[in-house]
Image (cartoon, grey):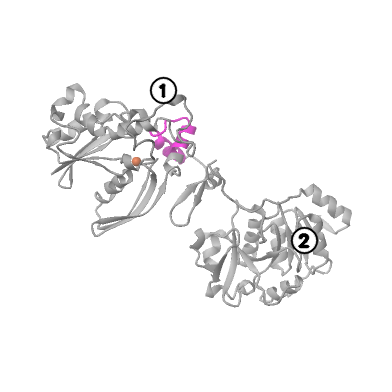
């Protein structure tokens, strides 16, 4: 039994002939037509089938098209976004290229989509009746309905099958990434006992492949064509744009991702409140007569104070929105000191049974708390409760609640660079990349908002130091470690 496989909808059109599960012949159309990639990867070229490659495959087995039992086409139009599939006719502007996107909900959608859909749906007719004149011999007798059975195959199912059916393993993980199929752009799954199970897919418009194409285009190369040149160039590069690219994607912690498009807003941080410049802050400090000094590196000097057992008011950048202190208006302290919870509750005049929460470097979450993979491996808004790893309790006793839990905040550099640096620098000194982070206020007071609020709270509580903007204010008598 013969099966003819056709790849034609997007780019690099090709054909393959399989006999009883074994590949007999396979070739790309460009090798015969001498047109690189065979055709342009544009919707209005979707009608072009790889007739020369098909003719070759049939010739290799000395067949005509009507001898094959199945024809498989590597795209399923029933899975495409519905741009008129259910109607008998398509609506197409006279000049699609001059039109805005086809769908308001998808600015990336091509105005050619109805035509693309029609071309794909007509592939059986095109195969039966569209062969170039000089190739008609092997195509004679074919009709749109056969005699072979036509199969539209989901695009990524075709990619997946090309991996697990060809691989020499009985059990394997399979992953596919391309620009896009009908909807899927990335899939992964498990093949075992002769069966494949897809575990997850990422759908268009989120696509690492299309991002790769954008980079290719940005560098002046031809997309869907010259990506291999970008791959070669990458070896010469420095990862200067790594953070920018990281910020383009949001991982869901379960193997999937979403792009942070310009289509929708994504919350990257909670620092949407008032912020104050160093100039404003210094003017207040000078006016109030507070003993302040400018720090060379506010994060580093704060970490040093914390490592020496000081409790520091941390006032940095724009204030966080919501009930939790997230490193803009926080009181920071060492978690290593078992008595710190009591000290802080006394300082804030709170009930002594109330726990204090930790902030940990995002990359160190799993070393200190469990289950680290939950919530996508990050908790930037201090919304989730974790267990302190039993072997770590002795190092961070101050942040472990009586039931073994801690309400953790994670921080990464992009989210809040100064805060991240303070935690990191504390970790460098102590081996513990964790700090106590509690709200900058005293009992029944809202968190501080302005520099004046911070100064007032600082002077009316036993805080040892205030790290405010680029300045440090310290009380006399707090120069020695407390414990
Ligand atoms: Fe693909």
Q: Quadrant of ligand 1?
A: top left
Q: Is residue 252 visible?
A: yes
Q: Ligand 1 closer than 8 Å to the CB at disc 2?
A: no
Q: Main secondary structure of the magenta part?
A: helix
What residue is pinned by disc 2?
466
User: SS for tag 1?
Assistant: loop
Q: How many marks?
A: 2
User: Residue 292, labelled with which disc?
Assistant: none
Instruction: Give the CA distance from mark 2 to mark 1.
Output: 67 Å
Q: Residue at x 80, y 47 (%)?
A: 279
Circle 1: is it few (<14), some (14-19), or many (20+) Cα within 10 Å? few
**Quadrant position of the C terminus in the picture:** bottom right
Along the polypeptide, which appears first: circle 2 or circle 1? 1
Q: Residue at x 59, y 55 (%)?
A: 412
Q: Residue at x 53, y 75 (%)?
A: 390
Above or below for 234 versus 134: below
Q: Position of residue 29 (x, y in %)?
A: 26, 31
Circle 2: is it few (<14), some (14-19), or many (20+) Cα within 10 Å? many
Q: Position of residue 71 (x, y in %)?
A: 20, 39
Query: Which residues fall within the magenta stretch?
Result: 212-234
Q: Ligand 1 closer than 8 Å to the CB at disc 1?
A: no
What residue is pinned by disc 1?
94
Mark 2 or 1, closer to the camera: 1
Above or below for 105 versus 255: above
**Quadrant position of the N terminus in the picture:** top left
Q: Position of residue 467 (x, y in %)?
A: 75, 58
User: SS for tag 2?
Assistant: strand
Quarter of the image for residue 60 reads: top left
Q: Residue at x 52, y 42 (%)?
A: 261
Task: Find out whether residue 379 is within the magenta segment.
Answer: no
Residue, far front: 88
């Amino acid at each position: 039994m013969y099966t003819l496989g056709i790849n034609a909808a997007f780019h690099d059109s090709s054909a393959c002939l399989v006999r009883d599960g074994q590949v007999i012949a396979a070739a790309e159309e460009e090798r015969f037509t001498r047109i690189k990639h065979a055709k342009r990867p544009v919707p209005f070229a979707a009608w072009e089938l790889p007739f020369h490659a098909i003719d070759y495959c049939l010739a290799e087995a000395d067949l005509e098209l009507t001898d094959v039992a199945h024809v498989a086409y590597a795209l399923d139009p029933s899975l495409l976004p519905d741009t008129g599939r259910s109607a008998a006719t398509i609506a197409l502007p006279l000049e699609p290229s001059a039109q805005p996107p086809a769908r308001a909900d998808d600015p990336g959608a091509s105005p050619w989509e109805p035509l693309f859909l029609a071309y794909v749906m007509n592939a059986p007719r095109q195969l039966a009746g569209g062969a170039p004149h000089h190739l008609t011999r092997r195509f004679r007798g074919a009709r749109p309905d056969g005699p072979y059975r036509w199969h539209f195959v989901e695009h990524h199912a075709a990619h997946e099958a090309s991996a697990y059916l060809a691989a020499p393993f009985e059990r394997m993980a399979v992953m596919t990434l391309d620009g896009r199929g009908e909807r899927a752009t990335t899939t992964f799954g498990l093949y075992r006992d002769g069966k494949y199970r897809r575990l997850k897919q990422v759908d268009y418009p989120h696509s690492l492949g299309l991002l790769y194409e954008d980079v290719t285009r940005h560098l002046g190369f031809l997309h869907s064509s010259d990506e291999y040149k970008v791959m070669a160039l990458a070896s010469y590069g420095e990862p200067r744009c790594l953070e920018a690219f990281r910020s383009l994607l949001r991982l869901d912690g379960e193997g999937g991702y979403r792009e942070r498009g310009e289509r929708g807003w994504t919350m990257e941080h909670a620092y949407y409140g008032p912020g104050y410049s160093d100039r404003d802050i210094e003017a207040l400090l000078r006016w109030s007569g507070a003993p302040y000094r400018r720090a060379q590196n506010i994060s580093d000097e704060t970490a040093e104070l914390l490592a020496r057992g000081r409790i520091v008011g941390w006032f940095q950048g724009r204030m966080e929105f919501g009930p939790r202190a997230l490193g803009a208006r926080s009181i920071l302290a060492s978690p290593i000191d078992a008595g710190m919870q009591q000290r802080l509750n006394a300082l804030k005049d709170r009930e002594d049974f109330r726990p204090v929460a930790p902030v940990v470097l995002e990359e160190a979450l799993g070393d200190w708390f469990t289950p680290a993979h939950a919530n996508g491996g990050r908790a930037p808004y201090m919304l989730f409760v974790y267990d302190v790893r039993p072997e770590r309790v002795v190092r961070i006793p101050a942040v472990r609640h009586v039931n073994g839990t801690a309400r953790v905040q994670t921080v990464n550099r992009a989210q809040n660079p100064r805060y991240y640096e303070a935690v990191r620098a504390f970790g460098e000194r102590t081996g513990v990349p964790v700090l106590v982070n509690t709200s900058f206020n005293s009992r029944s007071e809202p968190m501080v908002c302005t520099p004046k609020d911070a100064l007032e709270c600082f002077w009316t509580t036993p805080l040892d130091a205030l790290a405010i903007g680029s300045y440090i204010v310290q009380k006399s008598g707090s120069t020695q470690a407390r414990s």
